[in-house]
Amino acid sequence: MCPAIFMDNFLYFRLTEYAKISILNLTHGGKVKRNDILKKLAGAGFTFKEGDKHTKVFDENGVYRTVVGRHKEIPEWTVMKIEKQTGVKLIN
């Protein structure tokens, strides 16, 4: 477990004594509506399969790409990860 230090709206994780400190800025906690994400992914040719707690996303070849949670609004940092995994621009 990495020790965490909270300071001025930033969260610092110290990985090892020799590693650099990674900074995750938590101040811009925007959210995107789940339905908007699914509509954009469907428009890009992705298909969906409903799981217990997430919607699984598959590309046009049936290859599993990512999941989308069942929350009404998805945090912006999660949406950026979904963008990276699918290659679809979801945030304007």
Image (cartoon, rainbow, N blue to C red):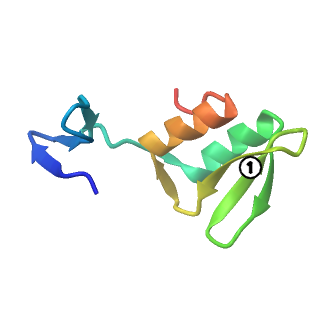
Please tell me in which quadrant of the rendered image residue 60 appears: top right
Image coords of residue 63 (percent x, y): 83, 44
Q: Which residue is mark 1?
A: 57
* 91 left or right of 51 in image: left
Q: Is residue 66 above or below residue 56?
A: above
Residue in front for this viewpoint, 12 or 7: 12
Callout 1 amino acid: Val
Q: Secondary structure at mark 1?
A: strand
Tell whether 61 sits left or right of 30. right
Please provide percent x and percent y for residue 50: 75, 65
Left or right, residue 86 beside residue 72: right
- The number of numbered discs placed on residues in the rendered structure image is 1
- Residue that lies at the very extreme toward the bottom in this rendered image: 52
Q: What residue appears at the point 19 percent right and 40 percent down from the top-left corner?
A: 12
Task: Tell me if mark 1 has few (under 14), some (14-19) or many (20+) residues whose alpha carbon lies within 10 angstroms of its own.
Answer: many
Q: Toward which corner of the image does residue 70 lie, by quadrant?
A: bottom right
Residue furthest to the front in view is 18
- Which of 48 and 32 lies nearest the eye of the viewer? 48
Q: Residue at x 83, y 36 (%)?
A: 45
Quadrant occupied by the N terminus: bottom left
Q: Identify the residue at horizontal 27%, vertical 33% (top origin).
A: 22
Q: Residue at x 21, y 41 (%)?
A: 14
Q: Is residue 56 above or below residue 25?
A: below
Give x and y (percent) for residue 32: 49, 44
Left or right, 41 with reference to 79: right
Q: 40 or 4: which is nearer to us?
A: 4
* Residue sitting at the far right: 61
Q: Position of residue 83 (x, y in %)?
A: 59, 33
